[in-house]
Structures are given as C-alpha cells and as structure tokens.
Amino acid sequence: MEVININTEVLDDAMFMLQKTSRTFFIPISRLTPGLKEAVGSAYLCMRAIDEIEDHEQLDEKVKADLLYKVNDALLSPNMENDLNGALAPYKEQVPEVSMRLMEWVQLCPTTARETVIRYTAKMSKEMAEWVEAKWQIRTEEDLDRYTYSVAGMVGELLSELWHWNDGTVTDRTKAVAFGRGLQAVNILRNKIEDQERGVNFYPDGWGIKEMLQYTKRNLKVADAYIADLKKGPALDFCKIPLQLAHATTKLIAAGGNKLTRDAVLKIVNKISG
C-alpha cells in the first residue's frame, strides 16, 4: 500500500460527514489504519453521495435516473472532475451536501486505490439509475437479490478489493456479497414504513416480515462465515461491528422492535472492541 500524506483538515472534514450520514459505519471506518481509513471512507462517502440521489424524495424519477447516468459517465470520463461537477451543478439547491461534494470524496482516496473506488461507484450509479427507471419493482426473490447486490452486495466486493490492496488479504467474493446483501436486507426490514410512505416496496410478491427475516438471516449467516475466514487485522476489525449491529437489529425486529438505541449501539461496539 502506498504511503500517503493526507491533509488532516480534509480527513477531519470527511470523518465529520461520515458521522452525519451513518452511525453504523462511522465507528469502524474511524478505527481503520492510515491509508485504509481514507480509502474506505472515500468509498463510503462516494456511495452515500449517489444513494442520496436515488432516495431523494423531491426529485422527479426521470431526473434522478438521468443524473445517476450522468454521474456514471462522468466518473468514467477522462475529464472526470469537470464532467462530474458539471452534472451536479444544476442541482446544488436540491441534492444534499454529501452528493454535491462527490469529487472531493473521490480525491480523498489514495491514488493507487482510487480506480477501484471510482469503478464501483460508477457501476452502482448506473445500476441505481436502472432501478429508478424500473420503479424499484421487486416481484421475486431473484429481483430482490439483484437489487440488494446493486446497492450493497457490490460494496462487499469493493471492500474485498480494498482489503487486498491494503495488506494482501484474500477473501471469498461470494461471501462478501452476502455480507453487503445481509446489511441491506436489515435496512429493508427497518425502513419498511418509510419506504411505503414514498411508494416503494422491496418485499417480493407474497412476502411478509417472516419471509424477509428468513432472507436476512440466511445472508447474515453467510456473512458470519465471511468474517470467520478473515485473519486478525483491519478487515476483521471493520466487518465485525456492522455485522453484529445487523444481527442485533434483526433480533430486535423479530421481537417487534425496530431500531437500536444509541446506547445499544455503543454497548455492542464497546463489547466488540474490548
């Protein structure tokens, strides 16, 4: 892995944005080693940036899809910075700060890992655009698998590449996809009411909470096997926290609850961290 000299103000600003956008991932990212912290932080913020476009409640769906396609094209363009900023500029009063600053998150990443982050962010942006156009129609379990891969499973693949970039860690990509897919399934369970309010249903036809819980637990079981294969190091330290939070949330939902309290989250994190 390359030795990097990052501006501490830039990193601090990025970590502040992470803290604002995800209590689940801020903690494990903040504990990563120098270099890997910037790479994973960059990846998360890039993907959060496009996720906020996909989930935007005021933007017209045609506008969303068009913007996501433009982001994909810009990320793969030789004039990436100009094209990306040009694509986002017309929406500066509408999309959130984390989206408008996408180019900054790209630049946060160490140069030797940057291509990986860009490639996956572009791919996710394109697939999100396709889901917007399809109006997020989930009819079968195969549809659900495709959706959870598009928005989370490929994050598992991305992380696998970053673990290898960092210290040569080799992981099972299929299990890595299940890791991401399981975390997304927890989000689907947790956000069902909010999703319904915006007219979206990620449950396959005929599915209720029982079937979605089974789907979630099945993927989290594979995610358990994924981290069981990891040797002691930053990859294992990172993955343990969101996975245990996912298990705890799933258990809570199965018992009739919904979201973990901040105290419950901190208790789990402290237990894992010793």
Image (tube, rainbow, N blue to C red):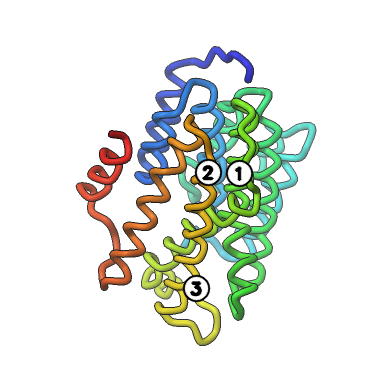
Q: How many marks?
A: 3
Task: Point out which mark residue 200 bears.
Answer: 3
Q: Secondary structure at mark 1?
A: helix
Disc number lying in front (3 or 1): 3
Mark 1 vs mark 2: give the one in front.
Answer: 2
Residue labelled with disc 2: 99
In terms of sequence position, does the residue under pointer 3 or pointer 2 come before the other? 2
Q: Position of residue 148 (x, y in %)?
A: 57, 62
The residue sitting at 72% across, 41% down in the picture is 74
Amino acid type assigned to the residue bearing label 2 in the image = Ser
Residue at point 46%, 42% (across, down): 239
For image coordinates 51% across by 62% down, the residue present is: 219
Residue 39 placement (x, y as % from top left): 56, 30
259 displayed left or right of 155? left
Q: Quadrant of the N terminus?
A: top right
Q: Residue 196 at what x, y percent from top left?
A: 42, 75
Q: CA distance from mark 3 to mark 1?
A: 25 Å
Q: Is residue 212 above or below residue 16?
A: below
Picture quarter containing residue 107? top right
Left or right relative to 62: residue 182: left
Which one is earlier in the sequence, the residue at label 1 or at label 2? 1
Give coordinates of residue 212: x percent, y percent. 46, 74
Q: What is the CA distance from the residue labelled 1 to the residue labelled 2?
A: 8 Å
Front residue of 71/181: it is: 181
**Residue contact at pointers 1 and 2, CB within 8 angstroms:** yes
Residue under numbered circle 1: 88
Q: Helix or strand or loop: what does disc 3 sit on?
A: loop
| Residue type marked 3 | Val
